[in-house]
Amino acid sequence: MCAYMASQNKNNHIVLLDKNEKIGKKLFITGKGRCNITNLCSREDFLKNVVNNSKFLYSSLSSFTPQDTIDFFNNNGLKTMIERGNRVFPASEKSSDVIKTFQKLLKKQNVEIILNSNVKNAYFDGKKYVVCLDKEKMLCDALVIATGGKSYPMTGSTGDGYKIANSFSHLVVEPKPALCPILLQDYNGELAGFSLKNVSVSIKLAGKKYSQFGEMLFTHNGLSGPIILTLSSLVNKFDLHGVTISIDLKPALDEKQLENRLLRDFETSKSKTLKNYLKELMPSSLIKTFLEKANLPLDEPLCDITKAQRNTIIKTLKAINFTVNSLDKIDYAIVTSGGVSVKDVDPKTMESKLNKNLFFVGEVLDVDALTGGFNIQIALATGHACGQHLAGIEGED
């Protein structure tokens, strides 16, 4: 987006360096290959979904809104569709079509694309920026760092931009995994592949409770799914080792309502075993783990369940607890939290406040958001703001 916008000035010679063998490698895998390009919501709602430094994005999101993103692709031959939660996808449901659209536009604008170009470092020689590749050096009037974060390094985002930012005296906020699975200690994978809907998950940290409601998934070594990914972004600044994560299986009912239901059910189903009765309250796959967590017998008849045991059932329904080991590795995070501090970056142009004509756009910045198309919109909006500014710079060929 930045290269395309900057190329609107015909006097600019734009060179796009990509360390991969093709452009858009990370974009290709987003949204499970469907590419959730934006979220069609108001600016206020959008900023509520930005976890870090939402105020920094106010200007760029105002200049290039989610509707502008839709219009941009529609006007350039890519039809879009809107799904649940205002998430916008290409109508073809193919991320490759998003990449093809950019390829077509960059070619039309004579943007020079150099693939397999490994940038080792960059510096300013007093007149030009010098970009050092494996076998050559390139000189430029303006340098844009759009290298992404450290998540999914196989797509090329290996933290290169942070090293370059450091070399230009920019502060880099420690990169952490965001939108990633949560790994557990007291869990052996027996529920791997099993999902729960309409549950609430919460973690208490530093006197505050972080909660999410919706759908989650058990993996072979922990928890994942939409609400877990969101929760991971909200708590990744804390040391989570040994912290308790609680799953409320009945968030719509309080303990008193559950007690009334159990009393009624126990009276009408006295001969049922606890294991068979619990099938009415939860999926069968969860019952064994539930009873182990509650330290209750599998085959105890309901008529022999004591009041204390009934209270334990209620409390475990409202909070089945697991012990967190950590967030998953940053390699497996959807996005990176942290990056180039926005304090030294102009929010209108993305230009460094420390080095004239040096720019940072997209995920390399210390800005990240929740799932739903927000992160790609941030990349497009910051790229657009920078490119629009660069279109006013008359660079030498």
Image (cartoon, helix red, strand yellow):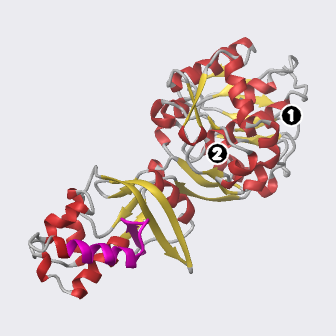
Magenta span includes 265: yes
The answer to whether residue 7 of the structure is visible from this angle is: yes
Check disc 2: other Cα within 10 Å, few if <14, some if 14-19, many if 20+.
Answer: many
* Residue bearing mark 2: 363
| Residue 139 rendering spot, x and y as whole percentages | 78, 29
| Residue 18 rendering spot, x and y as whole percentages | 61, 29
Q: Please tell me which of labels 2 and 1 falls first in the chain.
A: 2
- The amino acid pointed to by label 1 is His
Structural distance between the alpha carbons of marks 2 and 1: 19 Å
| For residue 294, above or below residue 61 | below
Residue at image location 54% in from the left, 32% down from the top: 35
The answer to whether residue 141 of the structure is visible from this angle is: no
Horizontally, is 264 left or right of 25 in the view?
left
Q: Is the N terminus in the top left, top right, bottom left or bottom right quadrant?
A: top right
Residue at image location 39% in from the left, 77% down from the top: 255
Name the element at disc 2. Answer: helix
Q: Which residues are magenta?
A: 243-266
| For residue 65, above or below residue 261 | above
Magenta span includes 129: no
Q: How many marks?
A: 2
Residue at image location 54% in from the left, 44% down from the top: 158
Are the residues flagged by discs 2 and 1 in contact, CB closer than 8 Å? Answer: no
| Residue 78 rendering spot, x and y as whole percentages | 62, 19
* Residue bearing mark 1: 389
Q: Nearer the viewer, residue 352 or 307?
A: 307
- The amino acid pointed to by label 2 is Glu
Q: Is the C terminus in the top left, top right, bottom left or bottom right quadrant?
A: top right
| For residue 80, above or below residue 263 | above
| Residue 297 rendering spot, x and y as whole percentages | 13, 76
